[in-house]
């Protein structure tokens, strides 16, 4: 059997048995004595340290409803630390709670989970214990908590220690039940706490509850997800600025840093309303933070509640509206000026009494041309707005894709300065919105024309297997490098090599949106600048109607 801090190894088997019996009888007394959980913790520690290595000793309660482990207190190398709580995670403590079975860890560095449990109490460098014995505190089948001893020596514990610890845990269970039952009010509180917990768990907004010291004492699932805290690395029960932020994920650190002044306000009793935090370390994210200070009926500060609401989508939509407005303002100037100019010219000629039919026709034609440009621009802006707002309407009909491609190419041939080849078999019929797919294809072909030299060849092909039709447009033009390839479908993106040509960077973005609304995907390939490009989009031949209500055929 294992040595226990040099205590048990000197005892004979007889003496060990007697020590265990003695322990059992004294624990019976212990169960009625503690007046609160902190006292129970001390009693349990004293008993444990008598019979085994209890360099690190931890006593935690488990809350089933919120799946939270609350460490009552803990001792490390004789120094007592405050507890904290963490959600059920991947560590040994959580494993014991989940399985309701004891766990002996002989060599943590070999068996241990890759993430360490942190309680936020360690001084300096984190040192991982080398061995541990963890037992559940059980009441019938329910796990009320755990007792865990850990040692910095490997193989400090054996089966006998688990037996001893289980004896201590049995008495702990009785004591916990007594402590909980003594006060009916406490039970009521617990019931309310459970109800509150359920409400918090169901909230979409991230919520943190802090105590008067500014320590985070509780957070809901949404907060955990937002902070991207792996369940086992979460640190609760400490003021935010004293957290081990360096070990938190980047985004969590950014949020935590922004929350420090918010929590400082709460500490001084001041609420915060709608403060915006923009995160940029990873994915862009805009959060609106509100915090309400809580005080007791007697007026004492109790801490507060911090609510974080993700407003990225709202901000993006606002930004889009601004962009669209700015773009519309900029792009409409030219056609409006031209329309006005030609209309004025026309008017002057008509009123001068000197009709010049040729000039009149030319001015009228210019007005028509620029009015068409204006209409086209408005359509693009409207479409992009609908796409972003999720209002893009798609009407599915069986469509012969080969015929559609041939028809488009045929229409372009008389005016294009390129050679347009079509490679499309007969009978590829997909269910799609013909008008929209025509729009997508038209944009790809116009890009191929725009971004390649006159006289070069553009090849449009349609291939299909049983489930998918893939349409590709290949050109011999300016090509795309790796950076461009990764971004061409982003709203407003224009490759540097393309900026000398007119464009808005909206066509591919919109086309991709249409293809996605069909349940398909779009991608680009190029061997690099000057090497030509191929744009592909794949459409499912038959649509799953349940997938998206916008894909329903109109009645
Ligand atoms: P626009 O052509 O109006 O800029 P698009 O959204 O259609 O907008 O295209 C976005 C960007 O993708 C273009 O600005 C260009 O940099 C690049 N691009 C699109 N098609 C091609 C192509 N066929 N060859 C090379 N680059 C292309």
Image (tube, rainbow, N blue to C red):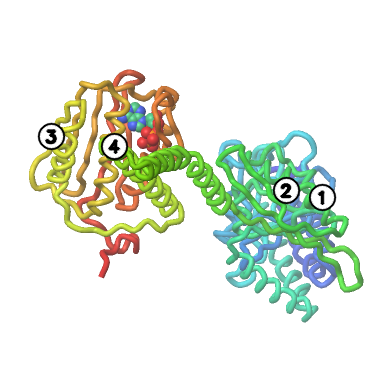
Along the line of sight, the residue nearer the viewer: 127 or 279: 279
**Viewer-nearest of discs 4 and 3:** 4
Tags 4 and 3 touching, CB below 8 Å: no
Tags 2 and 3 touching, CB below 8 Å: no
Choose top left, top right, bottom left or bottom right for residue 278: top right
Regarding residue 104, the answer to whether it shows in the image is no
Residue at image x 41%, y 28%?
Answer: 484
- Look at the numbered disc 3 and say if its residue's Cβ is closer than 8 Å to ligand 1: no
Q: Which residue is mark 2?
A: 119
- How many discs appear? 4
Cα distance, mark 1 to mark 4? 97 Å
Q: Which residue is mark 4?
A: 356
Is tag 1's residue or tag 3's residue first in the polypeptide sequence? Answer: 1
Is tag 1's residue or tag 4's residue first in the polypeptide sequence? Answer: 1
For mark 2, does the 10 Å Cα neighbourhood hold few (<14), some (14 to 19), or many (20 or more) residues?
many
Q: Secondary structure at mark 3?
A: strand
Quarter of the image where ligand 1 sits: top left
Q: Which mark is residue 81?
A: 1
Cα distance, mark 2 to mark 3? 65 Å
For mark 3, does the 10 Å Cα neighbourhood hold few (<14), some (14 to 19), or many (20 or more) residues?
some
**Picture quarter with the C terminus:** bottom left
């Amino acid at each position: 059997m294992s040595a226990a801090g040099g205590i048990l190894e000197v005892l004979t088997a007889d003496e060990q048995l007697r020590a265990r019996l003695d322990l059992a009888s004294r624990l019976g007394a212990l169960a009625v004595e503690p007046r609160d959980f902190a006292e129970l913790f001390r009693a349990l520690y004293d008993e444990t340290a008598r019979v085994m290595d209890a360099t690190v000793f931890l006593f935690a309660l488990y809350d089933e409803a919120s799946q939270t482990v609350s460490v009552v207190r803990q001792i490390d190398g004789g120094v007592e630390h405050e507890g904290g709580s963490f959600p059920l995670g991947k560590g040994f403590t959580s494993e014991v709670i989940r399985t309701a079975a004891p766990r002996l860890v002989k060599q943590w560095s070999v068996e241990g989970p890759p993430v360490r449990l942190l309680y936020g109490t360690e001084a300096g460098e984190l040192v991982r214990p080398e061995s541990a014995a963890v037992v559940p505190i059980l009441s019938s089948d329910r796990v009320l908590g755990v007792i865990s001893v850990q040692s910095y020596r490997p193989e400090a514990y054996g089966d006998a220690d688990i037996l001893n610890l289980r004896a201590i845990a049995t008495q702990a269970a009785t004591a916990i039940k007594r402590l909980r039952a003594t006060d009916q009010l406490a039970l009521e509180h617990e019931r309310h706490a459970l109800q509150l917990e359920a409400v918090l768990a169901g909230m979409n907004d991230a919520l943190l509850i802090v105590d008067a010291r500014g320590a985070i004492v509780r957070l809901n699932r949404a907060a955990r997800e937002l902070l991207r805290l792996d369940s086992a690395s979460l640190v609760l029960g400490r003021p935010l600025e004293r957290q081990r932020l360096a070990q938190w994920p980047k985004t969590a650190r950014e949020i935590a840093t922004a929350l420090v002044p918010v929590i400082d306000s709460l500490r001084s009793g001041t609420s915060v309303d709608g403060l915006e935090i923009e995160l940029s370390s990873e994915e862009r994210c805009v959060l609106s933070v509100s915090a309400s200070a809580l005080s007791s009926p007697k007026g004492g500060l109790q801490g507060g509640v911090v609510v974080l609401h993700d407003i990225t989508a709202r901000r993006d939509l606002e930004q889009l509206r601004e962009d669209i407005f700015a773009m519309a303002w900029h792009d409409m100037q030219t056609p409006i000026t031209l329309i006005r100019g030609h209309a004025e010219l026309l008017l002057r000629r008509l009123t001068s009494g000197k009709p010049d039919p040729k000039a009149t026709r030319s001015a009228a034609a210019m007005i028509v041309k620029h009015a068409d440009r204006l209409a086209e621009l408005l359509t693009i802006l409207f479409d992009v707005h609908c796409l972003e707002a999720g209002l893009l309407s798609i009407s599915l009909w069986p469509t012969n894709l080969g015929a559609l491609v041939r028809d488009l190419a045929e229409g372009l041939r008389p005016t294009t300065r390129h050679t347009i080849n079509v490679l499309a078999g007969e009978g590829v019929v997909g269910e799609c919105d013909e008008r929209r797919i025509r729009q997508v294809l038209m944009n790809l072909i116009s890009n191929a024309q725009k971004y390649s030299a006159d006289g070069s060849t553009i090849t449009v092909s349609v291939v299909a297997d049983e489930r998918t039709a893939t349409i590709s447009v290949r050109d011999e033009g300016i090509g795309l490098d790796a950076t461009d390839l990764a971004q061409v479908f982003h709203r407003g993106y224009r490759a540097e090599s393309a900026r000398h040509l007119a464009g808005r960077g909206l066509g591919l973005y919109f086309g991709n949106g249409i293809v996605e609304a069909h349940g398909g995907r779009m991608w680009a390939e190029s061997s690099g600048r000057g090497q030509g490009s191929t744009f592909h989009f794949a459409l499912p031949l038959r649509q799953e109607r349940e997938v998206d209500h916008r894909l329903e055929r109109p009645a």
